Amino acid sequence: MHYIVFDLEFNQEIPSLQEKKKYPCPFEIIQIGAVKLDSRWKTVGTFNRLIKPTLFERVNPFITELTGITTENLQEESLFPDVYKDFLEFIESVESVFCVWGMTDMKELYRNAEYHGLDQSLLPKGYLNIQPYCTKHFHLPAKSLLKLENAVSLLNLPVDAHFHDALNDACYTAEIMKAIYEPSMLPKVYDPAYIPVRPPRQRKKVIDFEGLLHQFQKMYERELTQEEAGMIKTAYQMGKTKQFLKE
């Protein structure tokens, strides 16, 4: 069994004043980078391919600024189906385990494959999402997920290549995994059809100031002045912010 640590770079629609379209694949993969590790964490192969886009033919300027990838860089590259086929050959076996930094790359790899009508069953289903394990390693709140750059810094790993390059980021993710790995980090099974159930949205509550003021008038058995009513409203709103609570 091998661990396939991979990372993706995406292209997306260039914002315009026109009405935004809904795309079946809003993040089009333009680079796949991966490191293959054996069971002893030894690197036994790497994969690095740029991809010529077909959905968004021009590279978004924001993406170019982030990754350094330009439209011109991709003109002579292979299309996604060809690179996907080569990536599957690199993986070799569905028994391999994918390792990623965040679930976006897993989701978009499957979604791009579906968009191009490619066989997703050939991809490994087992995966390890290293990001939350690294966050837990540093005893940070579960919602405070670390960025890749921050994790590299906290672990004092050498920075010998720029970030936001798919192969470089895959290499960094692999080094982080080696540094924090514990036997309790067991692969999960990825289901591309799974849709998380969101809790029902709570209705916004509105303060019944009229009822509040009426209650004060009953307590004091008189009409409130306009100034008094204003002070009560202000005090009630300030109390809801809990800014004056003491430990």
Image (cartoon, rainbow, N blue to C red):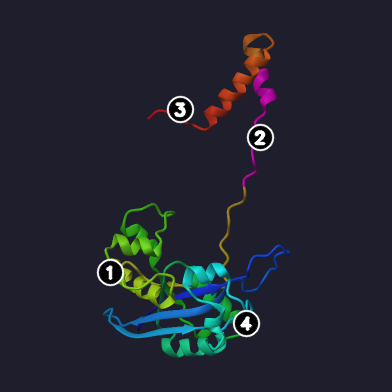
The residue under label 2 is 206
Hey, what amino acid is under mark 4?
Thr
Q: Which residues are magenta?
A: 202-216
Say which quadrant the N terminus sits in.
Answer: bottom left
- The alpha-carbon separation of the residues under discs 2 and 4 comes to 49 Å
Residue 227 locus on image (x, y percent): 64, 15
Residue drawn 38% across and 67% down?
130
Residue 235 visible, this angle: yes
Q: Is residue 150 above or below residue 226?
A: below
The residue under label 4 is 54
Q: Nearer the viewer, residue 172 or 64?
A: 64
Residue 43 locus on image (x, y percent): 30, 82
Tell which tag, 1 or 2, sits nearer the viewer: 1
Hey, what amino acid is under mark 3?
Phe
Q: Is residue 203 above or below residue 190?
A: above
Tell which tag, 2 or 3, sits nearer the viewer: 3
Residue 191 visible, this angle: no
Residue 84 locus on image (x, y percent): 51, 86
Give yes or no for residue 233 being in the magenta stretch: no
Q: Secondary structure at mark 1?
A: loop
Q: Is residue 54 above or below residue 210?
A: below
Give yes or no for residue 210 being in the magenta stretch: yes
Asked if residue 161 lies left or right of residue 112, the reply is: left
Q: Residues within 10 Å of mark 4 (few under 14, many from 20)?
A: few
Q: Residues within 10 Å of mark 3 (few under 14, many from 20)?
A: few
The residue under label 3 is 244
Q: Secondary structure at mark 3?
A: loop
Tell which tag, 4 or 3, sits nearer the viewer: 4
